[in-house]
Image (spheres, rainbow, N blue to C red):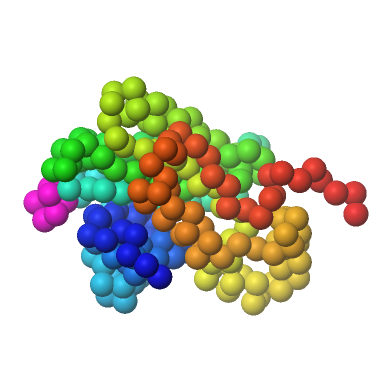
Amino acid sequence: MGDRMHNKVVVITGGASGIGEGMVRRFSVEGAHVILADTNAAAGARIASDTNSRFFPLNVSSEDDWCALAALIRNDYGRLDVLLNNAGIVSEKSISEVDLETWNRLLSINLTGAMLGCRTAIELMREHPDGTGGSIVNTASTTSYLAIPDVAYTTSKAGLVGLTKSAAVYCATEGLNIRVNSIHPGATLTNILRSALESTPEIESMLKRMSPMGRMGTVDEVAAMALFLASDEASFCTGGQFPVEGGTISEHPRLL
């Protein structure tokens, strides 16, 4: 690993598991001051200890929690360089099954939470002591393009594309050196998925067939894309959608 995030202050939401954990681990070894934000205090504190990062209890759907995090960043760091809006949940309910409580809860986390994160980050990045600057990366999904029956999840991930573009265009036209992009993972081998495969190994071949590359992605591969977009190497990338899915959204369904 290198030093591409040397001394940069990075907030990663949903960092206590899955892709978020992979991001915490990658950004930490790249020299960042990582704030791991999550509702899972036990896992968050453990991963923070493992990676020399800092845990902050954050419900992304709470405006008050975002205000508290912003106050901590101003007081303890004086700057924010990167926000990875990664927190998200699923419902597994179709349009015929979904209830309003489930719909509202999922959108409050997956979409409203990301909006609150973008708004908070832009406010902090405006105050950057070296001049307005920073990078926001929203974790969307291949379901931003290709729907699944989970209606709330699919809607939230499609909505993240609009949020990303709107925030990116706003920052650019306001003359702010703040870039906003989204990443779109496909089937990714997280620890949770690995445990599921142990109990239902028959689904592994189906998951691998989702990509024309014939395999699932890794959390490290998704974290690497986030790292690129957060780094100065992506200085002319904003408002973009960056798939990390082995070609899933490029292939026409096969007959065989």
Reply above or below: 179 against 77.
above
Left or right, residue 12 beside residue 252 = left
Left or right, residue 83 beside residue 99 = left
Residue extending farthest left = 75
Check residue 197 for magenta coloring.
no
Q: How many marks?
A: 0
From the top left corner, tell me how far across and down residue 5 is, in percent: 31, 59
Reply above or below: 250 against 47.
above
- At horizontal 54% and vertical 44% (from top left) the residue drawn is 242
- At horizontal 46% and vertical 59% (from top left) the residue drawn is 223
- At horizontal 16% and vertical 43% (from top left) the residue drawn is 130
In depth, the one of 104 and 147 nearer the eye is 147
From the top left corner, tell me how far across and down residue 95 is, in percent: 63, 36
In depth, the one of 18 and 237 nearer the eye is 237
Q: Main secondary structure of the magenta part?
A: helix
In depth, the one of 115 and 225 nearer the eye is 225
Left or right, residue 256 beside residue 241 = right
Which span is picked out in magenta? 72-78
Check residue 75 for magenta coloring.
yes
Q: Quadrant of the C terminus?
A: bottom right
Residue extending farthest top = 173
From the top left corner, tell me how far across and down residue 49 is, in percent: 27, 75
Q: Quadrant of the N terminus?
A: bottom left
Reply above or below: 186 against 239.
below
Residue 111 occupies quadrant: top left
Residue 134 occupies quadrant: top left
- At horizontal 71% and vertical 44% (from top left) the residue drawn is 250
| Camera sees residue 115 | yes
From the top left corner, tell me how far across and down residue 21 is, in percent: 41, 65
